């Protein structure tokens, strides 16, 4: 009986002349029967382009799997006449793409070019350099765009890949120019657009498009695309992804129908968004299948939704929606100028936008609608200026307080005459940053363009403190400090008021934030970043306390919940260990508790007579 032999073809280095792009070429191994090619940079069995070239020379270009062994490889191109091709990498298979010397930014985007039909990239690490881009041209780590809009491939699938960029302001992670595409379980970072699909004349196929299970970070857009040209297409699904932007630049999920035929249908659900926004423009109006964005996703800090619809135009109507459970405010970012100088919006548009934002914030509205100055002067907002307006979540939805005694959450023990240092820690209200304006210089103040908050906005932080009767406030030690560049800086007394004559409170500290900001004691960045604010003071344990008493201190800020620190009074007749600043445990007791316990009970307290 003859043993069955697979037909094996070894391609030698002479095939290097067939390589589409320069790179080290050692040959590739092809199994003609199983239609499997193997590229192994480490043992000399070839680069990926060699395998593709040899498949092309073999004549049958349908149904091949190209396996990539661990190693580092050059980018490659799959020609348009290839079909049903899978390129699959094992662990640590790295493809280096987008090095500046090779891309023309039009028919060649500088990365992996997949021009065939039904191409799958799986398990690859794609490491992108930086190709300088020109206006109207494209750079991408992975692309099936060959320079002619209209779709070069039937479909492209990218699965379980890591695609890393260099924070380019131009490049895409993946650029699709075909109606069929999927991106699943990938990690994409460091691009302007993680996923872009380009095709104003495309309809989503009936089978739909799926972008799911991906993690996107450090990208201006998680997905950005345009569809149009029909009304009977399938659904574009963006599901179960994790999208994270920054305070300064939100990561955007944007799907638009620029032809306004109502072709776009989208399902945005199951995602986790942090510092992100979802924008959908000119959705299918009849029978649309969109999931309700705000309730179908986890909308984290600073995340919101925009829907823009206006039949007959690209967009002159936008409604911004913040999550129902999010406390915060709307903000005109200053990142975008709304194109007034370029003639994209009428004069007075920015002032009108600011007026509408102020009105929404004054009323506490989580919905912001913008149409125009009047019916003859409509304003373009989201379609053209996606970063023009943000929702800022308060880092503290309501001001809260953290009460500490000598830096601890409880008082271990107290003796008559002990001095305890208390702190009340809270944060500046981030929402106040949305009220910041900038002065207009005039003849009296030619150089004065400092930021300010109008005086009628008298936002105050009010710290309430209630101590047990066996504690006595040392008011001279009270101070207010605000965190600035990692250090607490004391606020002058003129910006806060202390009252000790109120029933039910030992004292109250009211901080005038607007006056402090307008005088330069608080900066815009401190408001925006909800900087820490600390009220600190000392209190003395009265001589009248007896063993078994308890010292207690309660605090709250504005209408927050109370925070409490308390602790027992120990027998004042038990001798001290003798060390200044120790609590009254016996030396034997400390020895029994061990060194660690001894370290814990040493605090910053001082005996009254030692001051």
Image (cartoon, rainbow, N blue to C red):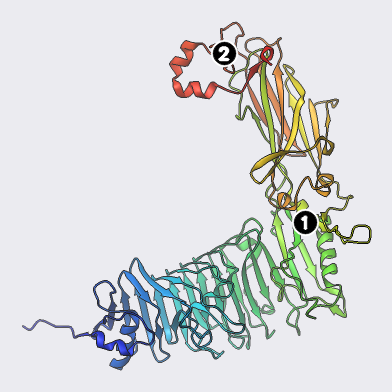
Estimate the x, y position of residue 556 in percent, counting from the top left: 73, 35
Q: Residue at x 80, y 57 (%)?
A: 361
Residue nearest the viewer, comparing 463 with 536:
536
Q: Which mark is residue 584?
A: 2
Q: Residue at x 71, y 52 (%)?
A: 525
Answer above or below: position of 328 versus 111: above
Quarter of the image for residue 121 reads bottom left
Q: CA distance from mark 1 to mark 2?
A: 51 Å
Check disc 1 and report the residue beneath it: 434
Give yes or no for contact between labels 1 and 2 (Cβ–Cβ under 8 Å): no
- Quarter of the rendering occupied by the N terminus: bottom left
| SS assignment at label 1 | helix
Q: Earlier in the sequence, mark 1 or mark 2?
A: 1
Estimate the x, y position of residue 259 in percent, counting from the top left: 68, 86
Is there any visible trace of residue 371 in the rendered image? Answer: yes
Answer above or below: position of 323 versus 511: below
């Amino acid at each position: 009986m003859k043993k069955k032999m697979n037909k094996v073809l070894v391609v030698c280095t002479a095939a290097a002349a067939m390589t589409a792009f320069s790179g080290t070429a050692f040959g590739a191994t092809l199994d003609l029967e199983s239609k499997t090619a193997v590229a192994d940079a480490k043992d000399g069995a070839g680069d990926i382009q060699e395998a593709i070239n040899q498949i092309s020379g073999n004549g049958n270009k349908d149904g091949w799997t190209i396996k990539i062994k661990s190693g580092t490889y050059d980018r490659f191109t799959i020609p348009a006449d290839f079909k049903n091709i899978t390129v699959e990498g094992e662990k640590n298979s790295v493809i280096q793409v987008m090095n500046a010397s090779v891309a023309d930014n039009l028919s060649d985007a500088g990365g992996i070019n997949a021009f065939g039909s039904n191409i799958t990239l799986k398990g690859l690490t794609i490491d992108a350099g930086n190709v300088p881009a020109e206006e109207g041209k494209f750079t991408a780590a992975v692309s099936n765009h060959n320079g002619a809009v209209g779709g070069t491939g039937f479909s492209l699938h990218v699965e379980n890949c890591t695609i890393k960029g260099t924070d380019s302001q131009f490049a895409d992670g993946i650029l699709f120019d075909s109606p069929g595409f999927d991106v699943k379980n990938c990690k994409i970072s460091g691009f302007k657009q993680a996923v872009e699909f380009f095709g104003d004349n495309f309809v989503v196929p009936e089978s739909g498009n799926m972008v799911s299970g991906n993690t996107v970070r450090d990208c201006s857009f998680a997905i950005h695309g345009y569809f149009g040209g029909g009304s009977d297409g399938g659904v574009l699904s963006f599901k179960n992804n994790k999208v994270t932007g920054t305070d300064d630049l939100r990561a955007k999920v944007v799907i638009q129908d620029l032809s306004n035929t109502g072709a776009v249908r989208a399902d945005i659900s199951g995602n986790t968004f942090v510092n992100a926004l979802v924008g959908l423009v000119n959705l299918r109006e009849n029978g649309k299948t969109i999931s309700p964005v705000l309730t179908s996703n986890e909308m984290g800090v600073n995340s919101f939704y925009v829907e823009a619809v206006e039949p007959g135009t690209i967009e002159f109507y936008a409604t911004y929606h913040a999550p129902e459970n999010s406390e915060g405010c709307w903000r005109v970012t200053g990142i975008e100028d709304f194109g007034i100088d370029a003639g994209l919006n009428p004069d007075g548009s920015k002032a009108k936008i600011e007026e509408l934002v102020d009105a929404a914030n004054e009323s506490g509205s989580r919905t912001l609608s913008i149409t125009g100055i009047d019916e003859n002067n409509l304003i373009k907002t989201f379609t053209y200026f996606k970063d023009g307006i943000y929702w800022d979540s308060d880092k503290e939805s309501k001001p809260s307080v953290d009460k500490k005694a000598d830096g601890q959450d409880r008082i271990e023990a107290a003796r008559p005459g002990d001095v305890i240092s208390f702190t009340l820690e809270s944060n500046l209200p981030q929402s106040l940053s949305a009220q910041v304006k900038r002065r207009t210089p005039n003849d009296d103040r030619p150089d004065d363009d400092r930021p300010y908050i109008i005086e009628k906005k008298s936002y105050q932080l009010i710290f309430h403190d209630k101590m047990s009767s066996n504690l006595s406030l040392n008011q001279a030690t009270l101070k207010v400090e605000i965190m600035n560049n990692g250090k607490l800086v004391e606020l002058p007394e003129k910006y806060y008021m202390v009252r000790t004559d109120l029933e039910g409170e030992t004292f109250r500290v009211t901080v005038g934030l607007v006056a402090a900001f307008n005088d330069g004691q608080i900066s815009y960045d401190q408001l925006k970043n909800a900087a820490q604010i600390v009220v600190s003071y000392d209190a003395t344990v009265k001589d009248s306390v007896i063993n078994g008493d308890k010292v207690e201190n309660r605090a709250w800020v504005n209408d927050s919940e109370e925070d409490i620190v308390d602790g027992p009074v120990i027998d004042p007749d038990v001798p001290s260990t003798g060390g200044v600043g120790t609590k009254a445990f016996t030396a034997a007791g400390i020895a029994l508790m061990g060194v660690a316990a001894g370290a814990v009970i040493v605090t910053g307290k001082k005996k009254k007579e030692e001051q």
